[in-house]
Structures are given as structure tokens and as C-alpha cells.
Image (cartoon, helix red, strand yellow):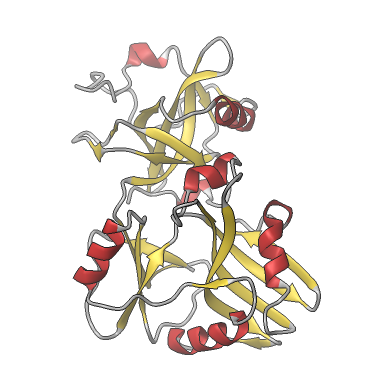
Amino acid sequence: MMATAAATLPRGSEWTYEVKWDGYRAQIVKNGPVVSLASRNLKDVTGQFRQVAAAAREVGADAALIDGEVVAIDARGRPSFQALHHGATEGLSIVFYAFDLLHVNGRSLLREPLADRRHALAEVVDGSGLLLSEPLPGTPDEIATAVKRLQLEGVVAKRMRSIYEPGRRSGAWIKVRFSRHQEFVVGGYKPDATNFDSLVVGCYDGAKLLSAGKVRAGFTPASRARVFECIRNLKVARCPFANLPTRRPGHWGEGITAEEMKAIVWVKPHVVVEVAFTEWTRDGSLRHAAFLGIRDDKPARDVRRE
């Protein structure tokens, strides 16, 4: 189940609010002593997060399916998305914030209201090494102020009586980001002597992939090499973006003209990356974009402008 993006938090007594954790969405599957972790794409990531798997073996159930987020916590107690996705986990704690319980001991909770699932989740998680993503107290304005002050990514609002809708981006879950970053699909790159100078990224509008401009900043040598390894064998002859070329490069150089397109290598739009930026321009490009990490837990076709 996924959340729908919005600019402001919904209000009313039927809503409850949680921190939007800046990490890696995953589900824990426990069957007796055997524990595995699956990404949103159902990729097995157990070996990647062995600390979480070890903690999950201690949950208070013989069998359980737990939804949540793998988060890297730095020395100041704050989530570090870049460290988690760049593999630089020295000095960090890798934890799992559980926020939903879908099955327990052979019983499905998918049709149970969120309030009941949360109650059951608290009992299952208690005493294990997993952390509980607790509901936040206060009004929506107070919550937004506190989360911004702590420099956390955002808030997810959920209807207390909502059921769990697998695979759906439901209006019963609303996410509001306070930091400017989101997922984008890689559709091309400008090569240099080693691998690439910049990526060309975009997001889907219906069936059309629309360019959001170039991403040049934010790469380390290791992350640049990893991205290139993911895209180097995806070359295609035609540009996958429906809105290119642009008429002019733009005031800040965000656009991609027909002349510049001659130097770009196009790739199949399969790889998803997380990108930070200061704002959207009027023509739908990113200003001051910087790479944060690869999102292999997000299907490319699900990437929309938020």
C-alpha cells in the first residue's frame, strides 16, 4: 500500500499522523525461525540488512508479515538516506521502523482497520529489536512545525478506520514532504571520459515520460560508478522523453536543446534515482538538482511528479 502525495496535511478526527521515514521501504516475513526482507519490488534484501533480520527473529509471533522502513540513523539520531544508499554505514545504526501488520500467526489483518492493526503490531514488536513508528501527538500544524524543526523528511497521514490495500496508492494514506526531493527515472546520460558527466531524468505523466532536466551534482566516485553499471547496458537509439528537445536551455541551464541532445546517450527508462532540488522551474525542470541514491525499491512506471 502506498501513499498519495499532497501539499498539506488533511485535518479531522479520523486522521492520524506518523513520521515519513527517509529510508528503504521493506516488509519482513517471519515463518518460525526463518526471516526474510522484501523490497517494494519484492526483491529479496535480507542479506543487505542482516541487522534487521536478526532483530525480526525476536518478534512475538511464530509467523508475521510486517510493513515498515529500513532507516540509517546517524550519530545525532537523524535518518541518513544518502548513507543508507551509498553503503557508507560506518558509525550508523541500521534500524527498522514498523508501521503496519498484515498477517500474524496465519490470520490476515488486511481488512482490519488501521487502529486494530496498530494495536496488534505493538504487541508483536514489543521486546524485539524492531522500532515502532508511533502516531504523532498534536494538531497537524504542530506536527508539521515539529517535524520541520527536526529536519525530518515529512509526515504520512492515515485514516484510522482504513483497511490495507496492497499495491494501491490510496487516498487513505496521504504523504507530505517538507524536504524537496523525490524519485526520478533515468532516461539518458551525457558521457565523459570515464562514465558520465550528468544524468537526464524525468517522471511519468500517464504513459508519457517527461524530462525534468539534468542531474550533475551529488555523486561520489563510488555512486557514479554504481549508477553507470546499472545503465550502461540499457542504451537505445531514440530519446524516451516526450517533451524533448526544449526550445532553449533555460535561465539556469535546466533545458535540453536539440543541439545538446546530440551528445546524450539514451537508455531504457528502467533505473530510478532519488534527487534533491531547490525548486521546479516554470517549464517543469529541476533547479540545482543533486543525486541522493538509487531506488531499486521503486518501479519506474510508478514515478510521478509529486
Which residue does the image show at 34% across and 75% down from the upper left? 136
Residue 76 vertical placement versus 250 (above, below):
below
Quarter where residue 64 is shown: bottom right
Is residue 242 at least partly visible in the picture? no
Which residue does the image show at 54% across and 84% down from the upper left? 122
Is residue 85 at least partly visible in the picture? yes
Quarter where residue 172 is shown: bottom left
Q: Nearer the viewer, residue 180 or 284?
A: 180
Tag count in the figure?
A: 0
Q: Nearer the viewer, residue 232 or 26?
A: 26
Q: Position of residue 285 (x, y in %)?
A: 28, 33
**Horizontal arrangement in the rendering, residue 7 relative to residue 133 (left or right):** left
Which residue does the image show at 39% across and 77% down from the upper left? 135
**Horizontal arrangement in the rendering, residue 175 relative to residue 2 (left or right):** left
Q: Position of residue 292 (x, y in %)?
A: 46, 39
**Horizontal arrangement in the rendering, residue 294 relative to residue 49 (left or right):** left
**Horizontal arrangement in the rendering, residue 147 relative to residue 238 (left or right):** left
Q: Position of residue 11 (x, y in %)?
A: 22, 76
Q: Nearer the viewer, residue 306 or 23?
A: 23
Residue 259 vertical placement versus 30 (above, below):
above
Which residue does the image show at 71% across and 76% down from the upper left? 58
Q: Position of residue 44 (x, y in %)?
A: 70, 56
Residue 267 vertical placement versus 68 (above, below):
above
